[in-house]
Image: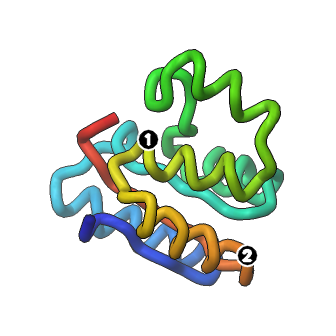
């Protein structure tokens, strides 16, 4: 999936979000994930983009996330946005190193 960007911080995330919007995506089709849940929520709110929820993952996946490790939860969310298991794993590894993932998709 070419609509995945790995960035260092919120400034770079904002730039990638603007680029996705210039390509025709709406803010409802752009998602941001970070390994630290507070950072993820803060950036999502600050940049006014969508959070990954029941609509994207489905009810049972959302409930299952309560019992998963953060890494497992992040991979499940990425897969719900259309990434392969291998791509989700690579992105989660980048988040382990402090990176932020920005995904634009019309699948969700």
Q: Farthest residue toward the left?
A: 24
Instruction: Please tell me which residue lies in front, 50 or 46.
Output: 50
Q: Position of residue 30 (x, y in %)?
A: 40, 49
Instruction: Please tell me which residue lies in front, 72 or 34.
Output: 72
Q: Mark 1 points at which residue?
A: 80
> How would you rate the neighbour count of disc 2 (Cα within 10 Å): few for under 14, some for 14-19, many for 20 or more?
some
CA gap, disc 2 to disc 1?
A: 20 Å
Q: Residue at x 44, y 59 (%)?
A: 85
Q: Which residue is drawn at 21% across and 62% down?
A: 22
Q: Position of residue 105 (x, y in %)?
A: 29, 48
In the image, which disc is placed on residue 34? none
- In what element is the residue under mark 2? helix
Instruction: Please tell me which residue lies in front, 4 or 23.
Output: 4
Q: Looking at the image, is mark 2 or mark 1 earlier in the sequence?
A: 1
Q: Which residue is drawn at 77% across and 41% down?
A: 68
Q: Name the residue under label 2.
A: 96
Quarter of the image with the C terminus in it: top left
Q: Which residue is drawn at 44% across and 49% down?
A: 79
- Tell me which corner region of the image, top left, top right, bottom left or bottom right, holds residue 27: top left
- In what element is the residue under mark 1? helix
Q: Please determine whether, in this image, residue 46 is positioned above or below residue 56.
A: below
Check contact, mark 2 vs mark 1: CB within 8 A: no
| Lateral position of residue 105 relative to residue 49, left or right | left
> How would you rate the neighbour count of disc 1 (Cα within 10 Å): few for under 14, some for 14-19, many for 20 or more?
many
Q: Please determine whether, in this image, residue 98 is positioned above or below residue 108.
A: below
Instruction: Please tell me which residue lies in front, 5 or 97.
Output: 97
Q: Position of residue 23 (x, y in %)?
A: 17, 61
């Amino acid at each position: 999936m070419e609509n995945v960007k790995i960035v260092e911080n919120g400034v770079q995330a904002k730039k990638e979000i603007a680029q996705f919007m210039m390509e025709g995506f709406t803010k409802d089709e752009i998602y941001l994930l970070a390994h630290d849940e507070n950072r993820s929520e803060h950036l999502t709110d600050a940049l006014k983009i969508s959070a990954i929820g029941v609509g994207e993952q489905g009810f049972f996946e959302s409930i299952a996330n309560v019992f998963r490790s953060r890494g497992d939860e992040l991979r499940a969310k990425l897969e719900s946005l259309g990434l392969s298991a291998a791509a989700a794993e690579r992105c989660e590894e980048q988040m382990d190193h402090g990176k932020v993932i920005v995904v634009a998709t019309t699948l969700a």
